[in-house]
Image (cartoon, rainbow, N blue to C red):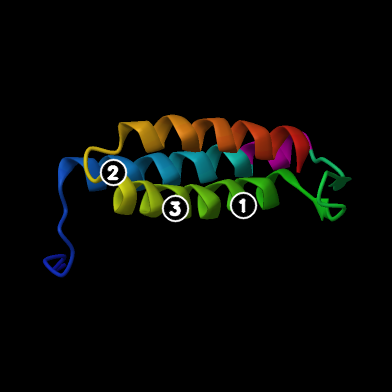
């Protein structure tokens, strides 16, 4: 399989592996302990999968904005994204 279209670095591979592992863990969690949707601060019903999606999507925008404002490396964005994800899972 030719994967030369993407710049596969160690960081890129680690990122996609972490996303895959997170999705597998969320799938196992939803099978073992199904959860009913809940209303959060946005007043919409969300499941843990919805909150994971919102966390990932928001983290992508946070990382892009951080990169545009401060440049590389983006370890600061990682901290902000982690806090954002915790907030999404707690209140959304």
Which residue appears at 45% of the width and 39% of the height?
Answer: 21
Q: Reading the chain from its start, which is encountered first: label 3 or label 2?
A: 3
Question: As rendered, which of 46 and 42 lies closer to the eye?
Answer: 42
Quadrant hosting residue 35: top right
Q: Position of residue 4 (x, y in %)?
A: 11, 66
Which residue appears at 73% of the width and 32% of the height?
Answer: 90
Distance, label 2 to label 1, CA atoms, is: 24 Å
* Disc 3 crowd, CA 10 A, few/some/many (<14, 14-19, 20+): some
Could you say which disc has been placed on residue 54 in the image?
1
Q: Quadrant of the N terminus?
A: bottom left
Q: Reading the chain from its start, which is encountered first: label 2 or label 1?
A: 1
User: Which residues are the magenta region?
Assistant: 28-33
Describe residue 27's horizontal placement relative to residue 64 as left or right.
right
Q: Quadrant of the C terminus?
A: top right
Name the mark nearer the viewer: 3 or 2: 2
Decide whether residue 67 is among the magenta residues: no
Q: Which residue is mark 2?
A: 70
Describe residue 6's horizontal placement relative to residue 40 as left or right.
left
Name the mark nearer the viewer: 2 or 1: 2
At mark 3, the secondary structure is: helix
Q: Reading the chain from its start, which is encountered first: label 1 or label 3?
A: 1
Which residue appears at 18% of the width and 64% of the height?
Answer: 6
Q: Position of residue 29 (x, y in %)?
A: 67, 36
Q: Position of residue 45 (x, y in %)?
A: 85, 53
At mark 1, the secondary structure is: helix
Could you say which disc has been placed on residue 60 in the image?
3
* Disc 2 crowd, CA 10 A, few/some/many (<14, 14-19, 20+): few
Q: Is residue 86 above or below residue 37?
A: above
Question: As rendered, which of 28 and 91 lies closer to the eye?
Answer: 91
Decide whether residue 29 is among the magenta residues: yes
């Amino acid at each position: 399989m030719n994967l030369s279209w993407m710049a596969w670095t160690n960081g890129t591979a680690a990122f996609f592996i972490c996303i895959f592992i997170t999705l597998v863990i969320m799938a196992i969690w939803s099978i073992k302990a199904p959860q009913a949707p809940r209303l959060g601060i946005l007043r919409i019903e969300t499941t843990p999968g919805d909150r994971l999606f919102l966390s990932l999507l928001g983290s992508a925008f946070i990382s892009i904005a951080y990169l545009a404002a401060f440049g590389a490396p983006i370890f600061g964005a990682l901290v902000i994204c982690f806090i954002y994800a915790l907030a999404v899972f707690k209140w959304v």
